[in-house]
Amino acid sequence: MSMADLDARMAFLMEADRLKSVVRATRLTDESRHENSAEHSWHLTLFALTLAPHAPPGVDRDRVIRMLILHDLVEIDAGDTPIFGEAGAQATDEQAAADRIFGLLPPDQAAEFRGLWDEFEAAETPDARFAKSLDRFQPPNLNLANGGGSWRDFNVGEDDVRARVGTKINHGAPALWSWLSPRISAFFNR
């Protein structure tokens, strides 16, 4: 490995540190503050590690973890768009961010990381569908734990939750949706 190669990898890693400054709409379980995108990515990798036995057959847990640790790096440039917020040119902004951020790496690693990010975004493989499902599964669980959190903030009802997150969770992790769905109903019908 050359010094230039190491310089490139370190530039990427130092840039990735900026993800700690991207604040998300979801609150921590204790409601003390909103989580940041780096915490979210870490938490999702722990979800993947812990919930892998509930993944559909053929899902590669380690590939899912790699996707999840990379998936939100684009928020360094594009910011976080809350699932219940207003969507704008997010996809275009995220593509440009992916070009820039993964482009900091040496070409072989840039292609590997960008390929995992693209696969996650497309959500067409079993691994990507499960990863995308976990990305949608974590926030409602935080909201259930903190009394409604971002659902209160965005004035979201049960039908909105089911439409915006339920279908994605069910698509890639039906067992997790079967577990979560009645808990969402109980929350909104109390």
Image: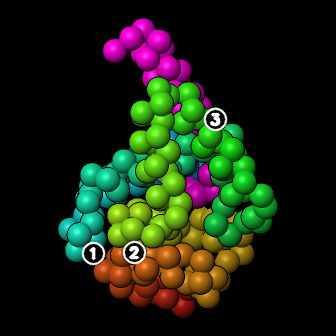
Front residue of this view, candidates 115 and 74: 115
Across and down, in percent, residue 2 comes to 39, 11
Separation of residues labelled 2 and 1 (CA atoms): 7 Å
Q: Secondary structure at mark 3?
A: helix
Q: Which residues are magenta?
A: 1-27
Q: Which mark is residue 56?
A: 1
Give the CA separation, mark 3 to mark 2. Answer: 29 Å
65 relative to 148, above or below: above
At 64% from the left and 57% from the top, the residue drawn is 25
Specify whether 125 is left or right of 84: left
Q: Which mark is residue 172?
A: 2
Residue 32 in sight from this viewpoint: no
Task: Check disc 1 and give the amino acid type.
Answer: Pro
Q: Which label belongs to residue 100?
A: 3
Q: Is label 2 in contact with label 1 (beta carbons under 8 Å)?
A: yes
- View extreme (bottom): residue: 189
Image quadrant occupied by the N terminus? top left
Task: Classify mark 2: helix, strand or loop.
Answer: helix
Q: Main secondary structure of the magenta part?
A: helix
Q: Would residue 29 appear left or right of 90 to someone viewing this image? A: left
The kind of secondary structure element at disc 1 is loop
* Residue pictured at 59% horizontal, 83% vertical: 163
* Residue 59: percent from left, percent from top: 27, 66
Q: Nearer the viewer, mark 1 or mark 3?
A: 3
Q: Is residue 156 above or below residue 78?
A: below
Who comes first in sequence, dot 3 or dot 2? 3
**Mark 3 belongs to which amino acid?**
Arg
